[in-house]
Image: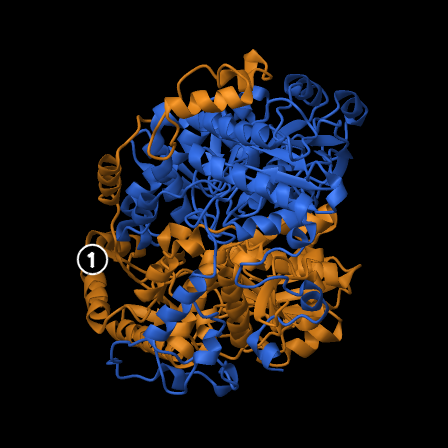
Amino acid sequence: MKYYDKLIFELSRPGRKGYELPADNYGCDALKEIPADLLRKDAPELPEVSELDVVRHYTNLSSKNFGVDTGFYPLGSCTMKYNPKINEEVAAMPEFAGLHPLQPAESAQGALELYYNLQKALANIAGLAEFTLNPYAGAHGELTGLMVMRQYHISRGDEKRRKVIVPDSAHGTNPASAMVAGLEVIEVKSKPNGSIDVEDLKPLLDDTVAGIMMTNPNTLGMFETEIMEIAKLVHEAGGLLYYDGANLNPMLGKVRPGDMGFDIMHINLHKTFSTPHGGGGPGSGPVGVAAHLVDLLPNPRVKKGEDGKFYVENGDKSLGSISSFLGNFGVMMKAYAYILSLGKENLKNVGPMATLNANYIKESLKDDYLLPIEGACKHEFVFDGLKDKSTGVTTLNVAKRLLDYGFHAPTIYFPLLFHESMMIEPTETESKETLDEFIEVMHKVAKEARENPDMVKNAPHTTLISHPDETTAAKKPILTYRQMKG
Amino acid sequence: MSNRFIPHTEEDISAMLEKIGVKSVDELFADIPSEVIFKEEYDIPSAMSEIELRNHFKELASKNDTLVVFGGNGVYDHYAPSVIPHLLERSEFYTAYTPYQPEISQGTLQYIFEYQSMICELTGMETTNASMYDGATAAAETIFMMVASAKKKNRVLLSATLPEHVLKVAKTYARFHGVDVTEIPEKDGVTDLEAMKGALGSGDVAGVILPAPNRYGVIEDFTGVADDIHSVKALMGMYVDPSTLAVLRSPAEWGADIACGDGQTLGMPMQFGGPYLGFLSCRQSLIRKMPGRVVGATTDASGKRCYVLTLQAREQHIRREKATSNICSNQSLMALYATIYISLMGEKGLREVNVLSADGAHYLYNRLIETGRFRPVFNRPFLKEFVVETDLDIKKVNAYLLEKGVMGGVDLGNSRVMFAVTEKRTKEEIDNLVTLMLEA
């Protein structure tokens, strides 16, 4: 197939159009009543294209993309599970899509019921008291959760608690969210196996500590076995425990964050609950809290009255608003459909099967790839590059070579604990056959690295483009069509 | 174990366990202290087949009323061309992750580049990011940008005529981040510019955010305002409705440095509050302080034009606690939505949408005044949304409208009500609204 590289702007022909509107029969000219100074002088240069131009252009662009529906996507920490199609269909139902966020609650009872039921289901799955679904994404959930943490201390008149302890292996959003929430980050070093060293933690726990942010399993996919001890220490010191729900998937059916002593958490509905990643959003990052923090959750809140009717409420102890309305409702609908599709009988198998898949890949590949930490992982694990370092083939090279074989690359160079990190997360939705194909290709790449390292170093070879010049892109940024034309 | 989303047969499981060298799946969880293992059943319903699921959603849907909408307040019932949902359902788009592997993500990267180009055309700004969550959080990030650019100055002025939800969110963010926010009071439905000038004199103002149109639908006159703001070395930010920028003076034409807002007005379903699209654009000189992802054009080894994520050194995954923002995932698919919408409409289509909406709104306004039961409040220019005062009981009227399948104007209190009209409304619907309100 020919390489399609037109921009929509380049298809533009003056006078062409892709819309029709009804005739204007109001008999007035509103724009004339607006002073000329308030009107635009230089018209924006936008494409003039037909409907078919648009359809063909974006269909062509879509064919230059790789999604979960295209092939295996073992991107660590991203939980690229299958996105059920029925979820797309129900979320688009006009009875929901056509709802104005400010229309009276009595006329949106179905939407509010769904919102309320999802809050309840997540609270039960998390082992926490209540959830808000308002946050728009994982990082937004972290920020909201940390605001809850700080608001808790402020509400107790304990404003000196501004430090939040974050493991050095944490996702980059953790320290960044803490900074945005006005907290100071104290990094705690991980032990060689990636888990938190309780002895290193103890001296940090003074009366300026607001809390700790953790994921469990951690970013190496290993369960923090001393979690109960950590929870006890942090609580005794007056701090709260925040759970980064990015790694929740393997815990489904096995462990609830609330039962491990966590007070606050966020869930990425676009990871654990199957809503599509959309090429980088829209996601949804609901935040759950223990009973003593419920009143601090952001406004507005969805509640159920004694008469069984659902209503929207703004609480006066709340930390404030963090979203325009009730969050990414369309995304919540998909997560709700997913929970109902699996039901209590199957949701509990998600964690075990995701864990089985990860361990199967790990054990099948550790002869060729360097496994820094032995033992059962959970939903994901990390290789420190190829075992045979003599070839000079890096993790980046292996990742690019995988693209040639029709697989998405794993997450690479994260976590920062190893030089050649390669983080693999298969999810439970992949079959043994898919995993076997991936394992076979990974072995093949290792063999190629030994026999023909230069070929691997120059990968990819079969993708539509290869080796884009990222240095020039950053040095002389061209961010718009206008800049491109010069 | 097998389910339509979990493919494991008993045979698969046995073979995999054997390879791993354990006897059971439970053994993979043996490191977890038994006291934290969840031993109960989840308190959620039993699994539903697709047929049952569909019926369940139909039942929920039946409890919602889809209304003829005359409410706005930041969310408008614009028309969504049929092409858009069809293209958004291309699963190569929606099942992809952030385009970290450019070789297999050119589709996403190119539409973001097109999106950036269009947002810059509309706002007149030189640069923009790949999207934000919503308008309100984009305004909050604008505050952070202003303070980060100003170094020692820590105050931002927000016009009291910004939409209420924007003010609320911006204030929450600012309070936690330790930024001082001062509201510029409103006077006769617009920003009190004299009060703004006074506030600028405090010496610690990093920036000012002003709305266009404002929370009452009024198009404010900001002549000379950019000079006032720049004279104290502060930044001028504007919160704008992007769909109006085909007709209204652009942020660049007003002399603004940063433009942000919500793209819901670009034909996006109201969807009970989201997903929408936040956008943030700025002058080139501010790019290093701009949050979020950015796509740039480049070439590959064989000289083909292509696109990559760029300027990532600003972002949280590199800078961690030193980043200006924590944003990671944004609203990428909604940026595609906006891109397709703008492609279909073009400059002329966007202009016509504004004209048709504004003509409808002015028609409704005139009809209301003619009844003698509604009076003008601000007497200022507006497009699709306006405020009137009435001696009717607004609560009673809106309850009656609801019975008739109409969402009436937004009740602002003090006998004031705010109506919005989009190109989807017809003359008949407007006439009917007036009739119903009078008979309520």
Residue B295 appears in the figure: yes
Quarter holding the N terminus of chain A is bottom left
Q: Picture coordinates of residue A3 (x, y %)?
A: 48, 69
The residue at 34%/84% (across/down) is A29
Query: Left or right: A63 with respect to A389?
Result: left
Query: Left or right: B5 with respect to A24?
Result: right
Quarter holding the C terminus of chain A is bottom right
Q: Nearer the viewer, residue A456 or A383?
A: A456
Q: Residue furthest top?
A: B34
How many labels, in total?
1
Query: Left or right: A119 with respect to B97?
Result: left
- Element carrying mark 1: loop
Q: Nearer the viewer, residue B115 or A407?
A: A407
Q: Quadrant of residue B123?
A: bottom right
Q: Picture coordinates of residue B341 (x, y %)?
A: 40, 68
Colour in which chain A is shown? Answer: blue
* Residue carrying label 1: B440
The residue at 59%/22% (across/down) is A376
The residue at 77%/36% (across/down) is A186
Q: Picture coordinates of residue A113 (x, y %)?
A: 33, 37
Chain letter of disc 1 in the image: B
**A313 lies above or below B289:** above
Q: Picture coordinates of residue A344 (x, y %)?
A: 36, 24
Q: Nearer the viewer, residue A29 or A407?
A: A407
**B216 lies above or below A373:** below
Residue A77 appears in the figure: no
Colour in which chain B is shown? Answer: orange
The coloring applied to the image is by chain
Question: As shown in the figure, which amino acid type bears the numbered disc 1?
Answer: Ala
